[in-house]
Image (spheres, rainbow, N blue to C red):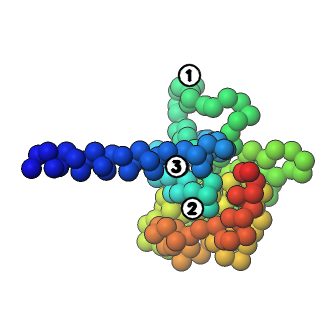
Amino acid sequence: MTGGTGAMNTTQLVVVMVWLGVSGVIWGAQSAIRIVVFDQAGTPESTLRKASETASWMFGSAGVETDWIVCPSSADPEEHCALPPPGEYLKVFVRRNGAGLKRTDNGMGLSLIARGKPNVVCYVFLEPAEALAEMAYGSFASAIASTLAHEVGHLLGLKHTAFGIMKPKFERRDVVAAASGRLLFDADSTKILRASRQ
Ligand SMILES: [Zn+2]
């Protein structure tokens, strides 16, 4: 009986190893896009981690691998995050709102886009995310995740679309959809994202 279970475990292990091998080939050609989330609003770290995981899943479902680092705000100036090498990551700043910034993306966030330059900085605002979460019965992390994916989507060259993550403005149902993994990049956005990674 024990021997039989052991044999089955070995088979399962082989299946997992083969799967990892295959996925390694798929992703091996192109490394993950690295994104660092800098909290400037005292957001609970667990909320930002959950939001980053959901945003990562959103990109993953479009075939794009992303690697997120959450850098919590700290009162100690000597406390630093372990960052990737300079120039090798996108920066997301999490703020209460867009006060002091010139132009915002319908209040949800802002991505700094300049022609002919790599676009690496965007902002996500908590107040509109909180308002959305309240309407959607408490999916704060999902509301942040939707904005994270949207603004990073702009940095990667995406424009607004009628449906999905690149909609110009989220509504209650979008946040509800995000909470259950149904808010995705639309087909055109997915094509552009995949093409940009080849
Ligand atoms: Zn936008």
Q: How many marks?
A: 3
Q: Residues within 10 Å of mark 3 (few under 14, many from 20)?
A: few
Residue carrying label 1: 78
Q: CA distance from mark 1 to mark 2?
A: 38 Å
Residue closest to the eye, 79 or 49: 49
Residue carrying label 2: 61
- Of discs 2 and 3, which sits in the foreground? 3
User: Which residue shows up at 70% across the image and 58% down it?
Assistant: 194
Compared to residue 99, the image places residue 187 above or below, namely: below
- Element class at badge 3: helix
Residue carrying label 3: 22
User: Which residue shows up at 49% across the image and 67% down it?
Assistant: 181
Residue closest to the eye, 38 or 14: 14
Task: Name which quarter of the figure residue 180 lies in.
Answer: bottom left
Q: Residues within 10 Å of mark 2 (few under 14, many from 20)?
A: some
Q: Amino acid at mark 3?
A: Val
